Image (cartoon, helix red, strand yellow):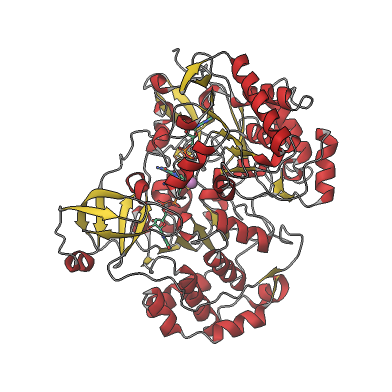
């Protein structure tokens, strides 16, 4: 294949920070683009530098494949499309459109996700979701519920003004390195306090002033202890509470009843250390929370930690101003954009609920078809219905066979579908179940827009040609849209799709391809804006209300039983492999170390360097034990890429022998 073009830039596909990259022919690797919106100085992390090495040419899918007599065989695009058209029509006729599921695509562009949602809804179903669901679901839900938007409240640039940070359930030093090194690290070096809350010490802890290591799943209690100190010591921002919040009295009363010592004991933390950290956070003029996947609840409705953090921010007046806020550090490169573009079962583009008749009518004006009014189940529930209510699935750029859900169950579901289409760039555990596989172009082979974690929409550009007969996801979705729906899928180029997205997504209204250019535009993008809005919720919350509610969080013991011989499994630092094997860039290859606290190791007679069997409900693997005080007692740590066979739904407990 020919060398990629050098003279223009695209956006790094390896995490949601959204750094600008170009191809450097001299080294054959990626380089930064000085003056770019996020990595202004041209910085890249080691993953980003390897962005052109992620997919091996030999592993790429280059022809459409169709299953015949049990095997996937190369076919023409027309044969593949014909088969999809026939099968989808049959399923809609026999079972109705809600027997279809569309699982989309934080690796794909805004335009691709938009057309994916448009395709599902034009066929008459809201059964469309994306993998953002697996990383940050409960935090986004809490933010939507209380603030009116799950978007990162502040920008990376203004975080540099914070005087204190709580980084919780997140390891940005490894996972979003340019965001950490270019924005958080300089603030901390300038004197900002960094409080790191994580049951395990990780690379982020090295910069922290304080490390609090609670028992996993008890963060809401830890945050409640912060709140208690702030109330007790008069660190409340009274003016903000009076002007911008509601429900304070009941909330304060519930905290007052709390017995700190008991709560601290449940969380396994030192109350004095928390009081000191709370003084630093509450005493700062501008204080920010950075949250990651570790604060996700044990179930879909469990957003206690996110709710507790929002209480803390409301109490200290740290929303709606610079250097503050609830900053969810998203993971996959276009996780935010896939949601903005409407690849969600309950929301149309721009986060408007499908239940809102005005929003539906506005979309219908542009589409000529009204989207269904009933919200659909989330991806997790759709997958559970595979082979039952769901008869066929269209999987775009994701790998549901590898999942934190019960793996065997998912594999059974995939097998029992009547028909499965997978559109990917390479073979995966999921293509193994497919009836039709469509070969797609990767990031550097296609153009469009993506939206990073701090809501900046940037343009990606074609730097090289796709191999063989592979096509951009957009071209494939347009072709399928024309066959399955008819009108509404004719576009000259990605720009035409983006223009339509700006017409149905009020947050993107007024943005344009030319306006973005080599820079970015950030949502919300009010009339006459130049670059967009960096701080959300300034005069009113995105909900449209001036006030956001406090929420009382129960601090009673959970009924979760942990047996004496069980340890809670912590995973993380998927350095170099984005969740599954396909995104491996060879940086920081996962190793098979099990970190175990010396006390737990002694109790099991486990020596340093010993091979041990680690077993959970879902699987068992062999690992090498390393005794470490970096994990708290009662927990063990395993690299996420290695831990996969052990993971199931909810929090994973393991036994070692
Ligand atoms: N067991 C276990 N489960 C997990 C996780 C874990 O660590 N362990 N991590 C969780 C998290 S945080 C996440 S984000 C999810 C990630 O879950 P997924 O998004 O499903 O996983 P990935 O392997 O990152 O990417 C999915 C597929 O996208 C394809 N792809 C990449 N670029 C393109 C493109 O431009 N077009 C198309 N069509 N395909 C493309 C890749 O080849 C890959 O097969 O998994 C979650 N589930
Ligand atoms: N190199 C690299 N970078 C990536 C990715 C990759 O695969 N490789 N993936 C991207 C993706 S998809 C995502 S979602 C992000 C993930 O980014 P992060 O959310 O930062 O991911 P982790 O490294 O898993 O960090 C989660 C932390 O939560 C902690 N934790 C676990 N349980 C609890 C708990 O109960 N309470 C608290 N307070 N902490 C807890 C874990 O110990 C761990 O340190 O990274 C993105 N960046
Ligand atoms: S921080 Fe994320 S976007 Fe930036 S270079 Fe690294 S992987 Fe790419
Ligand atoms: Mo993720």
Front-lying residue, 525 or 421: 421
Q: Position of residue 234 (x, y in %)?
A: 56, 82
Front-lying residue, 561 or 493: 561
Can residue 334 be seen here? The reply is yes
Numbered-mark total: 0
Can residue 341 be seen here? The reply is no
Front-lying residue, 344 or 430: 430
Residue appearing at x 25%, y 60% in the figure: 596
Q: Quadrant of residue 211?
A: bottom left
Q: Position of residue 582 (x, y in %)?
A: 41, 33
- Does residue 517 sit above or below 576 in this rendering? above
Residue appearing at x 75%, y 31% in the figure: 499
- Does residue 247 sit above or below 447 in this rendering? below
* Residue 582 in the figure: left or right of residue 622: right
In the picture, the quarter occupied by the C terminus is bottom left
In the picture, the quarter occupied by the N terminus is top left
* Residue 598 in the figure: left or right of residue 248: left
Q: Quadrant of residue 602?
A: bottom left
Residue appearing at x 29%, y 68% in the figure: 633
- Does residue 245 sit above or below 471 in this rendering? below
Q: Quadrant of residue 654?
A: bottom left
Q: Position of residue 351 (x, y in %)?
A: 70, 49
Front-lying residue, 335 or 495: 335
Q: Position of residue 442 (x, y in %)?
A: 51, 26
């Amino acid at each position: 294949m020919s060398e990629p073009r050098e003279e223009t830039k695209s956006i790094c596909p390896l995490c949601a920070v959204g750094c600008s990259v170009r191809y450097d022919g001299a080294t054959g690797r990626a380089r930064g683009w000085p003056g770019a919106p996020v990595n202004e100085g041209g910085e890249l992390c080691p993953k980003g530098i390897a962005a052109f090495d992620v997919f091996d040419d030999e592993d790429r899918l280059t022809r459409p494949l169709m299953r015949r007599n049990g095997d996937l065989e190369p076919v023409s695009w027309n044969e593949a499309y014909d088969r999809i058209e026939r099968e989808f029509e049959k399923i809609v006729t026999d079972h109705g459109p809600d027997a279809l599921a569309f699982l989309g695509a934080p690796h794909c562009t805004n335009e691709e996700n938009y057309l994916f949602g448009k395709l599902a809804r034009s066929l008459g179903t809201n059964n469309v979701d994306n993998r953002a669901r697996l990383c940050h679901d409960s935090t986004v839900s809490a933010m939507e519920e209380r603030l009116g938007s799950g978007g990162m409240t502040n920008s990376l640039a203004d975080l540099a003004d914070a005087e204190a940070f709580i980084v919780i359930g997140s390891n940005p030093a490894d996972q979003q390195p340019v965001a950490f090194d270019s924005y958080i690290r300089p603030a901390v070096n300038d004197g900002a306090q960094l409080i790191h809350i994580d049951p395990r010490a990780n690379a982020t802890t090295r910069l922290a002033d304080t490390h609090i290591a609670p028992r996993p799943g008890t963060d809401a209690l830890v945050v409640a202890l912060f709140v208690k100190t702030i109330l007790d010591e008069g660190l409340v921002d009274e003016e903000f509470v009076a002007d911008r919040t509601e429900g304070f009295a009941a909330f304060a009363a519930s905290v007052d009843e709390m017995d700190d010592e008991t709560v601290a004991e449940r969380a396994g933390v030192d109350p004095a250390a928390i009081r000191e950290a709370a003084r630093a956070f509450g005493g700062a003029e501008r204080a920010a929370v950075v949250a990651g996947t570790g604060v996700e609840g044990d179930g879909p409705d469990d957003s206690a930690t996110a709710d507790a953090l929002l209480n803390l921010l409301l109490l200290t007046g740290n929303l709606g101003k610079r250097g503050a806020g609830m900053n969810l550090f998203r993971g996959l490169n276009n996780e935010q954009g896939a949601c903005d573009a409407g690849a969600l079962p309950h929301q149309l583009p721009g986060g408007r609920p499908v239940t809102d008749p005005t929003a539906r009518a506005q979309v219908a004006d542009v589409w000529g078809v009204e989207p269904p009014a009933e919200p659909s189940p989330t991806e997790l529930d759709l997958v559970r219905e595979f082979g039952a209510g769901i008869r066929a699935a269209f999987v775009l750029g994701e790998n549901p066979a590898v999942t934190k859900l019960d793996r065997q169950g998912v594999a059974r579901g995939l097998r029992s579908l009547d028909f499965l289409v997978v559109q990917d760039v390479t073979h995966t555990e999921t293509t193994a179940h497919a009836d039709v596989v469509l070969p797609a172009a990767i990031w550097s082979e296609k153009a469009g827009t993506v939206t990073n974690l701090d809501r900046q929409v940037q343009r990606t550009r074609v730097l090289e040609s796709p191999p063989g007969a592979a096509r951009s996801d957009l071209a494939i979705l347009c072709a399928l849209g024309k066959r399955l729906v008819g009108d509404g899928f004719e576009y000259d180029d990605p720009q035409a799709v983006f223009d339509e997205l700006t017409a149905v997504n009020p947050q993107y209204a007024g943005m344009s391809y030319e306006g973005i250019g080599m820079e970015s535009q950030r949502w919300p993008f009010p009339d006459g804006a130049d670059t967009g809005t960096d701080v959300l919720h300034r005069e009113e919350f995105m909900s449209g209300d001036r006030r956001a509610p406090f929420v009382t969080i129960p601090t009673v013991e959970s009924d979760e039983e942990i047996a004496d011989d069980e340890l809670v499994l912590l995973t993380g630092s998927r350095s170099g492999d984005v969740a599954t094997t396909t995104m491996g860039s060879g940086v920081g290859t996962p190793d098979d170390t099990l970190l175990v606290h010396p006390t737990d190791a002694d109790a099991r007679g486990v020596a340093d360097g010993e091979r041990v069997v680690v077993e959970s409900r879902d699987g068992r693997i062999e690992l090498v034990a390393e005794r470490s005080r970096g994990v708290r007692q009662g927990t063990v740590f395993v690299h996420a890429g290695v831990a996969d066979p052990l993971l199931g739904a909810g929090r994973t407990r393991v036994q070692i022998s």
